[in-house]
Amino acid sequence: IFQVKLWHIPDGGLSMHLTDWLVELQGHKRRVAYIEWHPTAENILLSAGFDYLIMVWDVGKGLAVKVISCHSDVIYCMSFNRDGSLLATTCKDKKLRVIEPRRGIVLSEGQCHMGTKASKCTFVGSGRVLTTGFSRHSDRQYALWDQHDLSAPLVTDTIDSSSGVVFPYYDYDTNMVSLL
Protein backbone atom coordinates (compact mmCIF):
# COMPACT_ATOMS: atom_id res chain seq x y z
CA ILE A 1 0.00 0.00 0.00
CA PHE A 2 1.32 3.42 -0.99
CA GLN A 3 0.99 6.57 1.11
CA VAL A 4 0.73 10.30 0.93
CA LYS A 5 2.62 11.89 3.83
CA LEU A 6 2.11 15.47 4.99
CA TRP A 7 4.56 17.54 7.01
CA HIS A 8 4.31 20.93 8.69
CA ILE A 9 7.04 23.34 7.56
CA PRO A 10 7.70 26.02 10.20
CA ASP A 11 7.16 29.70 9.32
CA GLY A 12 10.89 30.44 9.44
CA GLY A 13 11.67 27.57 7.07
CA LEU A 14 13.56 24.40 7.76
CA SER A 15 16.39 24.46 10.29
CA MET A 16 16.84 20.68 10.40
CA HIS A 17 15.68 17.57 8.57
CA LEU A 18 12.05 16.66 9.14
CA THR A 19 11.73 13.00 10.06
CA ASP A 20 8.21 12.90 11.51
CA TRP A 21 5.13 13.57 9.43
CA LEU A 22 1.81 14.91 10.66
CA VAL A 23 -0.51 12.68 8.63
CA GLU A 24 -0.06 9.51 6.61
CA LEU A 25 -2.81 8.72 4.11
CA GLN A 26 -2.87 5.08 2.99
CA GLY A 27 -5.02 3.64 0.24
CA HIS A 28 -3.42 3.64 -3.20
CA LYS A 29 -2.28 0.27 -4.48
CA ARG A 30 0.41 1.78 -6.69
CA ARG A 31 2.66 4.85 -6.55
CA VAL A 32 1.00 8.24 -6.01
CA ALA A 33 1.81 10.62 -8.84
CA TYR A 34 -0.19 13.77 -8.19
CA ILE A 35 -1.91 15.65 -5.37
CA GLU A 36 -4.21 18.68 -5.39
CA TRP A 37 -5.67 20.62 -2.45
CA HIS A 38 -9.34 21.58 -2.67
CA PRO A 39 -9.51 25.35 -3.26
CA THR A 40 -12.31 26.10 -0.76
CA ALA A 41 -12.91 23.10 1.53
CA GLU A 42 -10.58 22.88 4.50
CA ASN A 43 -8.50 19.70 4.89
CA ILE A 44 -9.66 18.13 1.61
CA LEU A 45 -6.90 16.70 -0.57
CA LEU A 46 -7.09 14.68 -3.78
CA SER A 47 -4.44 12.18 -4.79
CA ALA A 48 -4.03 10.36 -8.10
CA GLY A 49 -2.00 7.19 -8.37
CA PHE A 50 -0.67 4.75 -10.91
CA ASP A 51 -3.61 2.55 -9.85
CA TYR A 52 -5.75 4.92 -12.03
CA LEU A 53 -7.72 6.07 -8.98
CA ILE A 54 -8.40 9.51 -7.53
CA MET A 55 -8.81 9.41 -3.77
CA VAL A 56 -10.55 12.25 -1.93
CA TRP A 57 -9.09 12.59 1.58
CA ASP A 58 -10.26 14.26 4.76
CA VAL A 59 -6.79 15.11 6.03
CA GLY A 60 -8.11 16.05 9.48
CA LYS A 61 -9.42 12.53 9.98
CA GLY A 62 -6.78 10.79 7.88
CA LEU A 63 -9.46 8.96 5.90
CA ALA A 64 -10.43 8.54 2.27
CA VAL A 65 -13.98 9.86 1.92
CA LYS A 66 -14.40 9.05 -1.79
CA VAL A 67 -12.65 6.98 -4.45
CA ILE A 68 -13.15 8.07 -8.06
CA SER A 69 -12.50 5.27 -10.55
CA CYS A 70 -13.32 6.61 -14.01
CA HIS A 71 -9.86 6.47 -15.62
CA SER A 72 -8.50 3.61 -17.70
CA ASP A 73 -4.85 4.65 -17.48
CA VAL A 74 -2.40 6.91 -15.61
CA ILE A 75 -3.76 10.35 -14.66
CA TYR A 76 -1.43 13.11 -15.88
CA CYS A 77 -3.06 16.16 -14.33
CA MET A 78 -5.92 17.32 -12.08
CA SER A 79 -7.32 20.83 -11.76
CA PHE A 80 -10.21 22.17 -9.69
CA ASN A 81 -12.39 24.99 -10.91
CA ARG A 82 -12.40 28.06 -8.70
CA ASP A 83 -15.04 26.90 -6.20
CA GLY A 84 -13.98 23.25 -6.23
CA SER A 85 -17.28 21.95 -7.58
CA LEU A 86 -15.63 20.48 -10.70
CA LEU A 87 -12.39 18.67 -11.41
CA ALA A 88 -10.71 18.44 -14.82
CA THR A 89 -8.27 15.61 -15.53
CA THR A 90 -6.02 14.53 -18.37
CA CYS A 91 -4.98 10.93 -18.72
CA LYS A 92 -2.59 8.69 -20.64
CA ASP A 93 -5.65 7.42 -22.56
CA LYS A 94 -5.58 10.87 -24.26
CA LYS A 95 -8.91 11.94 -22.76
CA LEU A 96 -9.91 15.13 -20.99
CA ARG A 97 -12.60 14.62 -18.36
CA VAL A 98 -14.68 17.00 -16.28
CA ILE A 99 -15.71 15.26 -13.06
CA GLU A 100 -18.11 16.19 -10.29
CA PRO A 101 -15.90 15.15 -7.36
CA ARG A 102 -18.61 14.96 -4.66
CA ARG A 103 -20.46 12.24 -6.54
CA GLY A 104 -17.43 10.93 -8.45
CA ILE A 105 -19.14 11.02 -11.83
CA VAL A 106 -17.88 12.13 -15.23
CA LEU A 107 -19.95 15.04 -16.56
CA SER A 108 -18.10 15.41 -19.85
CA GLU A 109 -15.35 13.54 -21.68
CA GLY A 110 -13.49 14.01 -24.96
CA GLN A 111 -10.35 13.23 -26.91
CA CYS A 112 -7.58 15.60 -25.88
CA HIS A 113 -4.10 15.95 -27.43
CA MET A 114 -3.12 12.96 -29.58
CA GLY A 115 0.61 12.89 -28.80
CA THR A 116 2.24 10.27 -26.60
CA LYS A 117 3.63 12.64 -23.96
CA ALA A 118 1.79 14.01 -20.92
CA SER A 119 -0.98 16.57 -21.31
CA LYS A 120 -1.91 19.12 -18.63
CA CYS A 121 -5.09 21.05 -17.84
CA THR A 122 -6.41 24.00 -15.87
CA PHE A 123 -9.79 25.67 -15.51
CA VAL A 124 -9.64 29.25 -16.80
CA GLY A 125 -13.00 30.65 -15.71
CA SER A 126 -16.18 31.24 -17.73
CA GLY A 127 -16.78 27.51 -18.10
CA ARG A 128 -13.56 26.92 -20.02
CA VAL A 129 -10.69 24.45 -19.62
CA LEU A 130 -7.23 25.03 -21.10
CA THR A 131 -5.07 22.03 -21.98
CA THR A 132 -1.50 21.68 -23.16
CA GLY A 133 -0.06 18.62 -24.83
CA PHE A 134 1.42 17.27 -28.03
CA SER A 135 0.14 16.60 -31.53
CA ARG A 136 0.62 13.27 -33.33
CA HIS A 137 3.76 14.81 -34.85
CA SER A 138 5.13 15.83 -31.40
CA ASP A 139 4.42 19.55 -31.78
CA ARG A 140 3.56 21.25 -28.50
CA GLN A 141 0.07 22.72 -28.56
CA TYR A 142 -2.65 24.22 -26.44
CA ALA A 143 -6.42 23.90 -26.71
CA LEU A 144 -9.37 25.71 -25.13
CA TRP A 145 -12.51 23.71 -24.31
CA ASP A 146 -16.08 24.33 -23.19
CA GLN A 147 -16.38 22.34 -19.94
CA HIS A 148 -19.89 21.19 -20.92
CA ASP A 149 -18.93 19.92 -24.40
CA LEU A 150 -15.56 18.22 -24.77
CA SER A 151 -16.36 16.72 -28.18
CA ALA A 152 -14.03 19.22 -29.88
CA PRO A 153 -11.88 22.12 -28.67
CA LEU A 154 -13.03 25.69 -29.24
CA VAL A 155 -9.48 26.62 -30.29
CA THR A 156 -6.30 24.62 -30.88
CA ASP A 157 -2.94 26.12 -31.78
CA THR A 158 0.65 24.91 -32.12
CA ILE A 159 3.20 26.46 -29.77
CA ASP A 160 6.45 25.02 -31.16
CA SER A 161 8.27 21.73 -31.64
CA SER A 162 10.28 21.60 -28.40
CA SER A 163 10.18 18.38 -26.39
CA GLY A 164 9.34 19.60 -22.86
CA VAL A 165 5.87 19.39 -21.35
CA VAL A 166 4.12 22.80 -21.12
CA PHE A 167 2.47 23.52 -17.75
CA PRO A 168 -0.53 25.88 -17.88
CA TYR A 169 -1.31 28.18 -14.94
CA TYR A 170 -4.28 30.51 -14.62
CA ASP A 171 -4.59 33.51 -12.31
CA TYR A 172 -8.26 34.26 -11.57
CA ASP A 173 -7.44 37.73 -10.21
CA THR A 174 -5.72 38.98 -13.36
CA ASN A 175 -7.47 36.65 -15.83
CA MET A 176 -4.04 35.72 -17.21
CA VAL A 177 -2.72 32.38 -18.45
CA SER A 178 0.95 31.48 -18.15
CA LEU A 179 2.42 28.60 -20.13
CA LEU A 180 5.65 27.41 -18.55
Image (cartoon, rainbow, N blue to C red):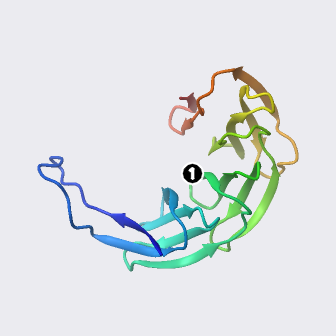
- Residue for point 54% across, 70% down: 56
Q: Please indicate whether residue 105 sits to the left or right of residue 22 in the image.
A: right
- Closer-to-camera residue (30/54): 30
The kind of secondary structure element at disc 1 is: loop
Other residues around mark 1 within 10 Å, as few (<14) / some (14–19) / many (≥20): some
Task: Look at the picture and state if 29 lies above or below 74.
Answer: below
Nearer to the camera, 152 or 22: 22
Quadrant of residue 177 in the image?
Answer: top right
Q: Is residue 80 visible?
A: no
Q: Does residue 120 show up?
A: yes
State the residue at coordinates (27%, 69%). Answer: 22
Figure label count:
1
Against 4, residue 158 (above or below) is above
Q: Nearer the viewer, residue 84 or 69?
A: 69
Percent x, y for residue 175? 57, 33
Residue sitting at the far left: 15
Along the line of sight, which residue is nearer the eye, 134 or 132? Answer: 134
Q: Position of residue 57 (x, y in %)?
A: 48, 72
Image quadrant assignment for residue 4 = bottom left
Residue drawn at 79 percent across, 28 percent down: 137
Position of 4 relative to 110 (above/below): below
Task: Name the spot of residue 179 as percent of width and height, x first.
Answer: 57, 29
Q: Position of residue 172 (x, y in %)?
A: 54, 39
| Relative to 31, 115 lies left or right | right
Amino acid type of the residue that numbered disc 1 sits on in the rendered structure? Arg
Query: In the picture, residue 157 is in which quadrant?
Result: top right
Q: Which residue is mark 1?
A: 82
At 70% from the left edge and 43% from the top edge, which residue is drawn? 129
